[in-house]
Image (cartoon, helix red, strand yellow):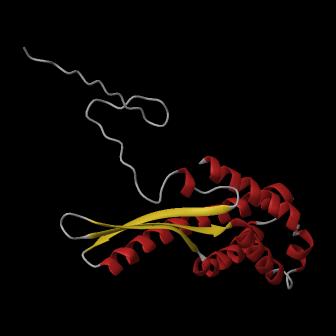
Amino acid sequence: MGCAVLIAATSCSKKGVPLASGEVEVIIPCSGPDYSTNKKHIRASGMGMSGDMNMAKKKAMAEATSALASTLNTLVERVATNYVNSYQVGETEEGKQKFEDMAKIVVKQKLTGISVICEKTMKTPEGKYKVYVAIELGGDELLEGINNSISRGISNDTKLRIDYDYDKYKNEFEKEMEKLERGI
């Protein structure tokens, strides 16, 4: 007499939607909610693969740094646009561009101060290395650097010096950081 065993398995994604039959969730190291941008940190992840472990790490860091730089540039442009549009009544496009340019200089300088918050190295069956990294830059540190740069940059520009209000700029910066956290 034979026995039959029936094993039923169900799997759900994080949002509660069942996975289709045969699908397997892929967990990517150094990614997910713990490594996403939030109100305090701008974060990015990257992966690099190579037969040489150091080259794989360099590729992962280059990918993550590129993603972080792109996010930072978008943040700076949106903050400058919102700040000038909201608070600089009658301000010219030239004034907006000056704020944006000064902030972008800081972004380039701050990219050297990033922190690695996750690094995982894997070896594939083919003998290649896969390196996953997540990096971050503190939002407060970035804002302070931007403020210092703007303050120095506008010292010779009477119109911008009169119009610049750090608290209002900070308010716009924080609003944009919240949008990044929500993925907007």
Compared across the picture, whether 117 is left or right of 79 comes to left
Q: Residue 46 in the image: x percent, y percent?
A: 43, 65
In the depicted structure, whether residue 72 falls above or below residue 108 = above
The total of numbered circles placed on residues is 0
Q: Nearer the viewer, residue 57 or 94?
A: 57
Q: Position of residue 168 (x, y in %)?
A: 86, 60
Look at 63% across and 53% down and name the residue there. 180
| Residue found farthest to the front | 1
Answer with left or right where residue 184 lies relative to residue 125.
Answer: right
Residue farthest along the top direction in this orientation: 1
Residue appearing at x 32%, y 28% in the figure: 9
Residue 9 falls left or right of residue 6: right
* Quadrant hosting residue 85: bottom right
Q: At x 83% / y 79%, what residue is drawn?
A: 151
Q: Quadrant of the N terminus?
A: top left
Q: Position of residue 88 (x, y in %)?
A: 85, 61
Answer whether residue 52 is visible to the viewer in this image: yes
For residue 88, say whether it is visible: no
Residue 72 location (% of width, % of height): 61, 66
Above or below, 96 against 152 in this view is above
Task: Give residue 74's quadrant in the image.
Answer: bottom right
Foreground residue, 95 or 2?
Answer: 2
- Residue 55 position (above or below residue 172): below
